[in-house]
Image (tube, rainbow, N blue to C red):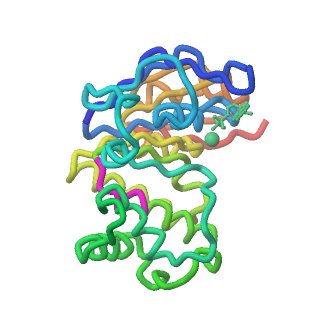
Amino acid sequence: MTVLVRDLDVALGGRPVLNGVSLDAPAGSWTAIIGPNGAGKSTLLRAVLGLVPSHGEVTVAGVDLGTLKPRQRARLIAYTPQNPNLPVGMTAFDYTLLGRSPYIPHLGREGARDRVITAEVLDRLDLTAFAARPLGHLSGGERQRVVLARALAQQTSVLLLDEPTAALDIGHQQQVMELIDRLRLSDELTVVTTIHDLTLAGQYADRLVLISAGRVAVAGEPAQVLTRAAVEEHFDARVRVTPGAGGRPVLSLERP
Ligand SMILES: Nc1ncnc2c1ncn2[C@@H]1O[C@H](COP(=O)(O)OP(=O)(O)O)[C@@H](O)[C@H]1O
Ligand SMILES: [Mg+2]
């Protein structure tokens, strides 16, 4: 399903945070939102979901999200926050099962199918061994994968992931990115992630949107966006950009 954002403005605490942000994420595409700390990346995802007040237009498959009830919206879009507030006493299995809530009738219980889907998702994320463990007894990286598991258990067509790899070691970063990519290709998922590792963003996304001070500074294919000049201007960093596999840019820091 296509996600369209048009001229989105958000103000928080009386201060403008996003100004006229637009983006197009066609069905089956992967868009990475990049930008320096505090640029407004998390706010953009939160505004798309209606978690913060905004002006502008957000549609999924042509439907204005503002017109949907929370349950309907949760069948369409799954979201993982950057710093989720986790119930530390809940097991990884039960937390992942929460992803099935939009399909469980009010006052009803989950069915066998919901438990099967939950177990499958945990398995795909290498989490079966942790299923019975309370979230408070998991490492940061394990918890981050459980949060993704909950979103995948929601079986939506759109995934909005805020820094999904931030706490992961390089092996689990690759595992999570490859899994998201496989799902996107097999199920035509529309993926929008914020991600602060620019090389990782450029390796997986087909489109990058660089947000700087609340505005879209550049958008396009990774090689168009991740230029030495743009990284210097918006991140105040000196980098070398070299073409990697498929012409996708690889960044390395340059010592002064
Ligand atoms: N609830 C809030 N009230 C006021 N300012 C906020 C609030 N949430 C975020 N901000 C500000 O909005 C800006 C963008 O934040 P955020 O979207 O989290 O940035 P990013 O995810 O790009 O690092 C920051 O300057 C942040 O301090
Ligand atoms: Mg953020």
Please indicate, yes or no, whether residue 95 appears anywhere in the rendered image: yes
Q: Nearer the viewer, residue 99 or 218?
A: 99
Query: Residue farthest to the front?
Result: 107
Q: Which percent across, then down, holds residue 104?
A: 31, 62
Q: Residue 84 colored magenta?
A: no
Q: Residue at position x 68%, y 19% from top?
A: 16
- Give the left or right position of residue 6, taking residue 113 as reference: right
**175 is higher (above) or lower (below) than 56:** below
Q: Residue at position x 39%, y 32% from top?
A: 207
Q: Nearer the viewer, residue 204 or 129?
A: 129
Taking the image in four quarters, ligand 1 sits in the one at top right
**4 is higher (above) or lower (below) than 79:** above
Image quarter of the N terminus: top left
Bounds of the magenta segment: 150-156
Q: Which percent across, then down, holds residue 83?
A: 63, 53
Q: Residue at position x 44%, y 44% from top?
A: 160
Q: Residue at position x 55%, y 63% from top?
A: 144
Q: Which percent across, then down, holds residue 136?
A: 64, 76
Splitting the image into 4 quarters, where does residue 248 fall? top left
Splitting the image into 4 quarters, where does residue 165 fall? bottom right
Q: Which percent across, then down, holds residue 21?
A: 51, 19
How many numbered marks have been drawn onto this rendered protein structure?
0
